[in-house]
Image: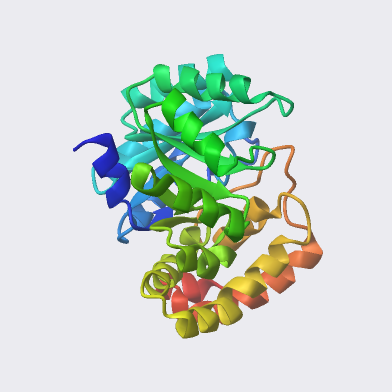
């Protein structure tokens, strides 16, 4: 299968496993393998290993490669694995080479650490990572890495391995212009959060990355199913009952997009452990509210998980 065909067939939901850590903040690879095995029992289009929800920026390159290796092994061919990379051109290219050997099928490239880079420098960064491996690239346009439609086209010319685009801005107006300008040159994915599902599918994305996939895979899949069917009445029900209350909790502190998900997983009997700095774990005053919300999730949880709340 060509890189273009692979990216175009990824429709629905990307599962986005967290990276479990032990109490001493070392990797808990056994827990990761267990979680991935459970996630791959659901029909996600792919899994993202060591991405933003996977706390990539708190890990060393060696740890990232280990996380990707274990994810690939635990997925056991049931779905492709997308590996996160970034930092700078040299480290990003090194990670790309190594995760390809570990079995990753695609790269999710996060922005470089330096926020003041000119266009040519940014393009060189992505080209260097593309040249580090033979895998197709998905650019994750998040934080300061904001692109115009014309810049996306120029980056495609500069880095031919670029095959997919993951939006992390949540600006549907701008993203729609990017998609319309560049057409089927790329596969288009939503990536800022489950709370943006209605907007993403309204403008025509083919899949989105879901952190909720860690705790309620059936909810993630239901959101995508309703989104692809343009069933906005059903989406409204799902958003009001499940998604908006969870995201309101996540907004209580910076970095809570990971901390809250890990705390919820632990409540439901899924190993996740603490977060690493610069993030911080959920505060006690927020845990009770999260536990109450997980009770509302009961009809979207597996029987065993629901019984643990």
Question: Horizontal and vertical percent for residue 103?
Answer: 31, 30
In the displayed orientation, state which residue is furthest to the left.
1
How many numbered dots are placed on residues in this image? Answer: 0
- Residue at 56% across / 76% down in the picture? 239
- Residue at 54% across / 49% down in the picture? 167
- Residue at 68% across / 42% down in the picture? 143
Whether residue 188 appears in this view of the structure is yes
Residue toward you, 170 or 173 = 173
In the displayed orientation, state which residue is furthest to the right.
285
Q: Quadrant of residue 42?
A: bottom left
Question: Horizontal and vertical percent for residue 81?
Answer: 35, 41
Residue toward you, 13 or 57 = 13
Say above or below: 99 vs 289.
above
- Residue at 66% across / 74% down in the picture? 245
Question: Horizontal and vertical percent for residue 44?
Answer: 34, 57
Residue toward you, 199 or 222 = 199
Residue toward you, 123 or 70 = 123
Work out which quarter of the rendered image holds the N terminus and state it: top left
The colouring scheme, among rainbow, by chain, secondary structure or one colour, is: rainbow
Say above or below: 275 vs 70.
below
Question: Horizontal and vertical percent for residue 191?
Answer: 53, 52
Whether residue 16 appears in this view of the structure is no
Work out which quarter of the rendered image holds the C terminus and state it: bottom right
- Relative placement, left or right, of 99 versus 199 is left
Q: Quadrant of residue 100?
A: top left
Say above or below: 104 vs 202.
above
- Relative placement, left or right, of 28 versus 161 is right
């Amino acid at each position: 299968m060509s890189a273009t065909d692979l990216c175009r067939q990824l429709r629905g939901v990307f599962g986005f496993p967290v990276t479990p850590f032990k109490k001493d903040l070392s990797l808990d690879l056994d827990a990761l393998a267990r979680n991935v095995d459970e996630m791959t029992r659901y029909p996600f289009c792919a899994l993202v290993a060591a991405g933003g929800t996977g706390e990539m920026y708190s890990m060393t390159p060696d740890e990232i490669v280990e996380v990707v290796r274990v994810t690939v092994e635990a997925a056991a061919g049931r779905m492709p694995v997308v590996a996160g990379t970034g930092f700078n051109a040299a480290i990003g290219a090194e990670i790309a080479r190594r995760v390809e050997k570990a079995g990753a099928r695609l790269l999710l490239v996060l922005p470089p650490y330096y926020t003041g880079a000119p266009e040519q420098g940014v393009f060189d960064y992505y080209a260097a990572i593309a040249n580090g491996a033979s895998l197709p690239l998905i650019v994750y346009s998040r934080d300061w890495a904001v692109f115009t439609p014309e810049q996306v086209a120029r980056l495609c010319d500069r880095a031919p391995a670029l095959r997919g685009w993951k939006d992390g801005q949540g600006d549907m107006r701008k993203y729609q212009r990017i998609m319309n300008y560049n057409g089927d040159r790329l596969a288009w994915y939503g990536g800022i959060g489950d709370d943006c599902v209605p907007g993403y599918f309204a403008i025509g994305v083919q899949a989105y990355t879901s952190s909720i996939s860690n705790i309620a895979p059936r909810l993630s899949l239901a959101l995508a199913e309703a989104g692809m069917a343009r069933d906005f009445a059903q989406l409204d029900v799902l958003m009001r009952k499940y998604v908006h209350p969870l995201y309101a909790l996540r907004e209580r502190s910076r970095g809570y997009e990971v901390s809250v998900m890990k705390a919820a997983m632990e409540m439901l009997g899924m190993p996740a452990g603490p977060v690493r700095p610069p993030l911080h774990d959920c505060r006690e005053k927020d845990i009770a509210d999260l536990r109450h919300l997980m009770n509302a999730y009961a009809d979207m949880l597996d029987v065993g998980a629901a019984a643990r709340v």
